[in-house]
Image (cartoon, rainbow, N blue to C red):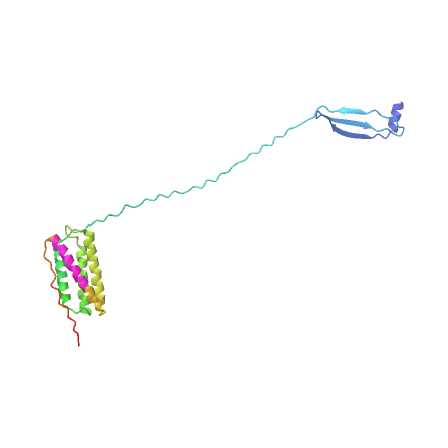
């Protein structure tokens, strides 16, 4: 048959054209090109109506990690305010003996030259007697802080005067004059509280400075 012979003589060439229509459905056109005889071959159009579409849904799981830092809590408890209490009970016989010793200390120091070891030793003894009074309770009716403060100050001065007398310093005499005066004030306070009569001897006469003409 002539159609079969023409088909055998032709160099069959197929071109694949892929287009897209307005509806989104792809159209495939298959065209046959004429051979040497120039006989045209009708065009055949194949329309693909079914499209296999697969939708892939990707799901991502996000794991959030939270780091919690614990903050330590410090509770500060303030200690109770200290209160001044006197636990030592006043011992009257001991206090009377120590006050008598103070009077004797002053009597002996008034007769000494406040220079050298003898005066230094007596001033040390006076400091010890003042410390013993401080170790005893305050006499009834006296303000404890004021009483103890006066005894502590006198003790410091007596020890300092002892060191100065041992070094033969002239400051020992002037310091002793202050000690003697304040000891009289202390004994007057004790007399008022205990109804006693402690008194210091009259101070020794001061040497009168001589002038030369």
Q: Nearer the viewer, residue 22 or 19?
A: 22
* Residue drawn at x 15%, y 58% as measured from the top left: 185
> How many marks can you see?
0
For the record, the magenta segment spans 177-192
Quadrant of the image for the N terminus?
A: top right
Is 163 left or right of 8, judged from the image as shown?
left
* Residue drawn at x 21%, y 66% as measured from the top left: 172
| Occupied quadrant, residue 175 | bottom left
Is 2 left or right of 101, judged from the image as shown?
right
Quadrant of the image for the C terminus?
A: bottom left
Residue 13 vertical placement versus 190 (above, below): above
Q: Position of residue 37 (x, y in %)?
A: 90, 28
The reply to whether residue 96 is in sight is yes
Q: Nearer the viewer, residue 209 or 180?
A: 209
* Residue drawn at x 14%, y 61% as measured from the top left: 102
Q: Position of residue 83 (x, y in %)?
A: 24, 47
Specify whether residue 16 is painted magenta.
no
Q: Nearer the viewer, residue 5 or 177?
A: 177
The outermost residue toward the bottom is 213
| Occupied quadrant, residue 163 | bottom left
Q: Position of residue 168 (x, y in %)?
A: 22, 70
| Occupied quadrant, residue 95 | bottom left
Residue 181 vertical placement versus 167 (above, below): above
The reply to whether residue 94 is in sight is no
Residue 74 vertical placement versus 56 (above, below): below
The outermost residue toward the front is 213
* Residue drawn at x 77%, y 24% as measured from the top left: 46
Specify whether residue 190 is painted magenta.
yes
Q: How would you classify the magenta stretch by its main secondary structure?
A: helix
Is 17 left or right of 75, judged from the image as shown?
right
Residue 140 vertical placement versus 183 (above, below): above
Q: Position of residue 198 (x, y in %)?
A: 11, 58
């Amino acid at each position: 048959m002539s159609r079969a012979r023409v088909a055998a003589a032709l160099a069959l060439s197929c071109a694949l054209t892929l287009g897209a229509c307005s509806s989104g459905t792809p159209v495939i056109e298959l065209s046959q090109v004429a051979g040497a005889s120039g006989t045209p071959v009708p065009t055949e159009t194949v329309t693909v109506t079914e499209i296999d579409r697969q939708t892939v849904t990707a799901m991502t799981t996000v794991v959030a990690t939270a780091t919690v830092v614990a903050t330590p809590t410090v509770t500060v408890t303030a200690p109770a305010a200290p209160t001044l209490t006197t636990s030592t009970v006043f011992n009257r016989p001991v206090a009377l003996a120590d006050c008598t010793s103070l009077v004797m200390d002053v009597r002996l120091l008034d007769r000494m030259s406040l220079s050298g070891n003898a005066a230094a030793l007596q001033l040390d003894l006076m400091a010890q007697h003042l410390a013993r009074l401080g170790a005893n309770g305050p006499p009834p009716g006296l303000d404890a802080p004021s009483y103890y403060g006066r005894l502590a100050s006198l003790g410091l001065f007596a020890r300092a005067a002892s060191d100065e007398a041992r070094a033969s310093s002239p400051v020992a005499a002037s310091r002793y004059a202050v000690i003697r005066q304040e000891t009289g004030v202390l004994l007057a306070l004790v007399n008022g509280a205990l109804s006693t009569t402690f008194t210091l001897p009259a101070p020794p006469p001061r040497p009168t400075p001589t002038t030369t003409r």
